Structure formats: C-alpha cells, structure tokens
Image: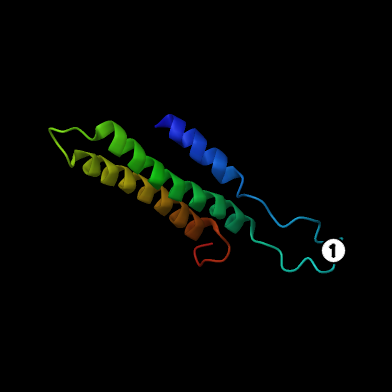
Amino acid sequence: MHSLDLIVSTIGVYFVKTKPGLPSLKSNYGELEDPLEIIKRGFYVSLFLAMIGLYFICFNFLNVPKFPNAYMCFFFCSLIGVGVAFMFVIITQYYTDYNYGPV
C-alpha cells in the first residue's frame, strides 16, 4: 500500500507545473494560473491513479476463493478513504481561499 502511495504521488508531482516562461518577459503569456489549481491538478491525478491502484491491490491480494467478493468490500472502504481525502481539500479550500465567503 505504501509503495502505491510513493508511485502515485511521484507521478502526481509531474502534473504540478505552470506554463513555461516568465509572465513579465513574455507579452503573449496569457492569464496567470491560480497556484491552488495547479496543485489540485496533481492531487486529482494522484487520486485517480490511487483508485486504479487500490482496485488492483485489492483484487490481487484479497481475492480469495472462500469469499469471492470480499475484495470489493475492501476496495469500497479504500474509496471512502480517498473520498475523505478529497473532501479535506475541498473544505480546506473553502475556509482558506480568498475566493470564498468565510475568508
């Protein structure tokens, strides 16, 4: 499970990047990106890959003949954990981002 964490987060880091170049030196740079949106892009990629990896792990290691569908219960439990992590990000953004009312 922890190996999956390392692989997924390493891949997610590669999606956390801005457009190349400096906005002050390029007249056609366009609109500046919100830093939080850039970070969330990597987080969403990591969440998607984690769900795929969790299914693979649950199916291969928890699929036993005596309980043929037990691996799905473990997979859904892990999806609840992924969903809670997603909600932490959304709730934290709501209460800390200047675009929302509480700030």
Task: Decide if residue 102 is on the left or right side of residue 72.
Answer: right
Viewer-proximal residue, 71 or 17? Answer: 71
Q: Name the residue at the right extreme.
A: 25
Q: Which class describes the residues within 10 Å of circle 1: few (<14), some (14-19), or many (20+)? A: few
83 or 63, nearer to the observer: 63
Q: Which residue is mark 1?
A: 26
Residue 40 lies in quadrant: bottom right
Give whichever of 63, 32 is nearer the camera: 63
Q: Residue at x 55, y 45 (%)?
A: 12
- List x then y, in percent, for residue 4: 44, 35
How far across and down, in percent of the image, does residue 90 sit? Answer: 45, 57
Instruction: Find the residue positioned furthest to the left.
Output: 66
Count all numbered tags in the image, as a single digit. Answer: 1
Residue 3 image-quadrant placement:
top left
Q: Amino acid at mark 1?
A: Lys
On the image, the x and y values in percent for residue 14 come to 61, 45
- Image position of 13 (left or right of 45): right
- Examine the rendered structure and indicate whether residue 5 appears above or below residue 89: above
Question: Which quarter shows the C terminus?
Answer: bottom right
Quadrant for the N terminus, please.
top left
Which residue is pictured at 30% across the width and 37% down the height? 58
Q: Quadrant of residue 22?
A: bottom right
Indicate the position of residue 17 as horizontal and vertical percent values: 66, 51
